[in-house]
Amino acid sequence: MSLFRVYVDGALFYHPNLSKLVITEAKISEDAVNIDSLNLSAPFSHPYIDSIKPMASVIVCKKGEEVVFEGRALDDGSDFYNTHSWTCESALAYLKDTVQPPFSYKGPLKGLLEQFISVHNSKVEKQKQFKLGNITVTDNNDYISYSSSEYTKTIDAIKNKLINTHGGYLQVRYEKDEKYLDYLEDFKLRSLQKVEFGKNITDVKITKDHTERVTALIPLGARKTIQDEDGNEVQSEERVDISSVNNGLNYVHDEKEVKNIGWIWTTEVWDDVTIPGNLLKKAKSRLGDLVKGVTSIQLTIVDESDTGADIGDIHARMYVECISNPHGINGTYLCVSRTRDYLNPAGNTITIGASGVSLSQATVNQDKNISALEDDILGQTNKIDSITGELNTINSQKMYRTELVVDGVSIFRNKGQRSIMQCKVYSWDKDITNTLSADSFLWHRKSSDEEADKLWDSSHKGMKQITITTADVYDNASFYCEVNL
């Protein structure tokens, strides 16, 4: 099972096997369409409590070797017990730190994102820089024309000029200590876990927001080009519409839903669409989403990777097979958001479908590209049989724990005394010490002589039990064992 650790500015802040580096909360909220967040808390006795500097310190969470969060603290608070808490935002928020100057761009879609990232990187330190990653969002003509006369935050410029007009998702990806910013039409990663009622689903909450429903849509395209008095081509305030290809009507509507709930109007702008026929196609497709409203399906689950199963985690931005026949859930859905408490996994949730966002951004099309998706699971070609049997609620305190057993004296008062110290490892209440390799055990001594402690540590690796004599505690020393699972 991969261990969860927290680092602050490269230094270890939390490790489950180091009692002094204890924390009280580490809850990560992943969101496919927004910035991920981390709630982190530590007691006042934590030795590095002052090392976290809001807006300055880099906070990294890892599970095994995978980076599950990188970002910065936004605030620092404390409660009645002087427990310190920080709300943190992920690395994607670095795009809020820079502004894009007024610009005029004509060319392929990829080039505009490349321009935005280049400007951003030139204005920030290396830690906040991104490399241009995978871009799978496309434009039908592979040619866009955008301009702005205002200074705009980089994150807003990307949303306004790319995501709002062409759809897609931003994703921060880590490779060889580099951060890549991907712009993806859809996510290709699929979870090897199956979420199923009666096995690993502990609660289901379905919310349908009918206030977001629309029955009539007025679509608007790019601004029309006209000639001014001097014969120059300029953009007018009038936009392309669909009346010329839609029997004189500048709107589309759903007759069935109009009869059911009446006329509910809205309008949307596609700045890159110059042909009325293409605008009509986009409007009809968009209306199909709008008439449904926003549906949020939240599942409280037991992530089987938390039980020690070698099956891989579930994250936002991946597809998950979900089956709950009593609730009408049966298909492969995009995991839009994921809340994971790394200290208390019993309350972990995933949200499939839409999560407080417009359906054009996050609606799951269950039939689209599923067959192709199964052939392209990024190397995960082995089908994993789901763990059978109903899983009980996880007690996080009993997942993995260590226990030091001393045979002999604990306080050395006379010469010649000795004790045998053994480290036992439990999974829940089961002793798994004998199943672990001796190489997993690393003993440590802490005394007033740091150099001597290092020599002592190096000579006590790979032992499940050690013998301590008076010579080992000639002054004052404490001992503990670190276990790498």
Image (cartoon, rainbow, N blue to C red):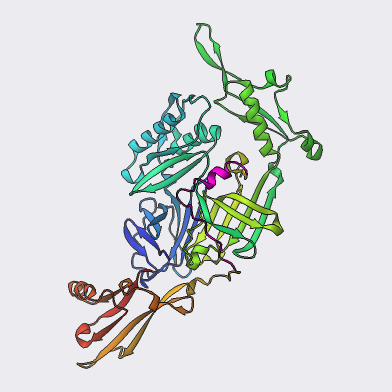
- Quadrant in which the C terminus appears: bottom left
- Image-based side of 103 in relation to 367, left or right: left
Residue 375 place in picture, x, y as percent: 51, 46
x and y percent of residue 384 in the render?
52, 59
Residue at the spot 46% in from the left edge and 29% down from the top edge: 109
Locate residue 93: give its quadrant.
Answer: top left
Q: Is residue 412 visible?
A: no
Say which of 299 and 105 sits in front: 299
Q: Determine the residue located farthest toward the top in the rendered image.
A: 230
The residue stretch that appears in magenta = 367-388
Q: Nearer the viewer, residue 137 or 254?
A: 137
Above or below, 460 against 355 in this view is below
Spot the residue most to the right: 259
In this rendering, position of residue 216 left or right of residue 345: right
Is residue 113 rendered to the left or right of residue 195? left
Describe residue 83's horizontal placement relative to residue 407 as left or right.
right
Residue drawn 53% across and 62% down? 303
Whether the magenta-drawn stretch holds residue 176 is answered as: no
**Who's the residue at 43% across and 75% down the image?**
401
- Report x, y in % for residue 195: 59, 59
Q: Nearer the viewer, residue 50 or 103?
A: 103
